[in-house]
Image (spheres, rainbow, N blue to C red):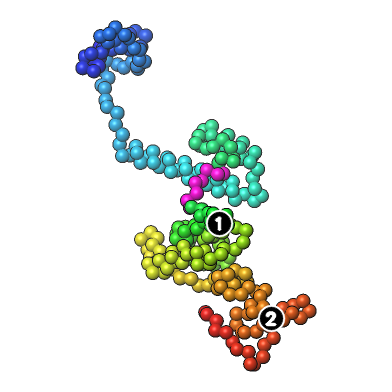
């Protein structure tokens, strides 16, 4: 059987041993392994349908979801699962079920790429990261919708999530800079709401929960250990028997406290 290639400049001959010899005008020969077909078989062009593409996408997302679930399971273990045991599990799963899994637990547990930028202050070597409150609220609402609202509302304890994290040898020097991204985002959420699955939710701040140092930092007032630390009166502190007290009488002027 002869097969013309490149407009007749090269021909292919199928030998008895199943090898196809490519010969050209310069006398050189190339060998190509081909599959034998019946004389009546028709040559058909390879095609990929939309169903094939959707199946590949479904398989890809299904496999990656399984990997994410496995990673969450390993990270939420209590007590923490030893890395040696995770290595053994990864070796078993890689053979047949999930060949794309990393070989070691160290790589497997750290394959998630960070979706945020860390701001580094060169003056004091402090670090600050903001996590985008909108995306985290969306995950919470989706969890509520998935688990049904009545059962979720019966819970008395809710797991908090971080909005921002600061790392440094001392507290942030500028509270306005520290809260800048949060203030901008919360103003937008209060004005436009949060859109989830075509439904818009209203967002409002109910209260800030702070300990005393954080309260003083956010309100830009004296710390709780200062002489004039009381934010509700103009009384200087006194120490009595190693305790700090603020003696109050009727003539003491009350401070105006913001709600």
User: Which residue is more in the foreground, 211 or 45?
Assistant: 211
Report crowding for label 2: few under 14, some 14 to 19, many 20 or more residues within 10 A (C-alpha): some
Q: Where does the N terminus fall, quadrant-wise?
A: top left
User: Which residue is more in the foreground, 96 or 32?
Assistant: 32
Q: Distance between the residues labelled 1 and 2?
A: 36 Å
From the top left corner, tell me how far across and down residue 100 is, in percent: 49, 36
Instruction: Answer left or right for 32 relative to 120.
Output: left
Specify whether residue 110 is painted magenta: yes
Q: Which residue is drawn at 57% across and 67% down?
A: 156
Which residue matches tag 2? 237
Mark earlier in primary sequence (1, 2): 1
Q: Residue at x 42, y 68 (%)?
A: 187
Is residue 54 at least partly visible in the picture? yes
Look at the picture and state if 207 lies above or below 55: below
**What segment is highlighted magenta in the picture?**
109-116
Which residue matches tag 1? 123
Look at the picture and state if 230 lies above or below 26: below
């Amino acid at each position: 059987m002869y097969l013309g290639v490149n407009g007749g400049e090269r021909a292919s001959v199928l030998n008895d041993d199943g090898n196809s010899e490519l010969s050209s005008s310069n006398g050189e020969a190339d060998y190509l392994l081909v599959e034998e077909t019946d004389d009546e078989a028709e040559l058909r062009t390879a095609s990929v349908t939309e169903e094939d593409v959707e199946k590949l996408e479904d398989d890809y997302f299904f496999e990656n979801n399984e990997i994410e679930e496995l990673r969450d399971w390993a990270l939420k273990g209590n007590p923490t699962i030893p890395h040696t045991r995770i290595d053994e599990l990864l070796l078993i799963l890689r053979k047949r079920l999930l060949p794309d899994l990393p070989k070691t637990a160290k790589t497997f547990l750290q394959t998630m790429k960070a979706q945020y930028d860390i701001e580094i202050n060169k003056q004091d070597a402090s670090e600050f990261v903001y996590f985008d409150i909108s995306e985290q609220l969306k995950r919470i609402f989706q969890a509520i919708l998935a688990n049904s609202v009545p059962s979720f509302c019966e819970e008395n304890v809710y797991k908090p999530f971080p909005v921002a994290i600061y790392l440094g040898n001392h507290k942030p020097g500028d509270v306005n800079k520290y809260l800048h991204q949060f203030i901008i985002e919360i103003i937008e959420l209060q004005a436009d709401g949060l859109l989830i699955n075509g439904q818009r939710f209203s967002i409002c701040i109910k209260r800030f929960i702070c300990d005393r140092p954080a309260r003083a930092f956010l309100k830009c007032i004296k710390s709780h250990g200062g002489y004039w630390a009381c934010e509700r009166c103009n009384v200087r502190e006194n120490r009595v028997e190693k305790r700090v007290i603020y003696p109050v009488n009727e003539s003491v002027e009350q401070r105006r406290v913001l709600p």
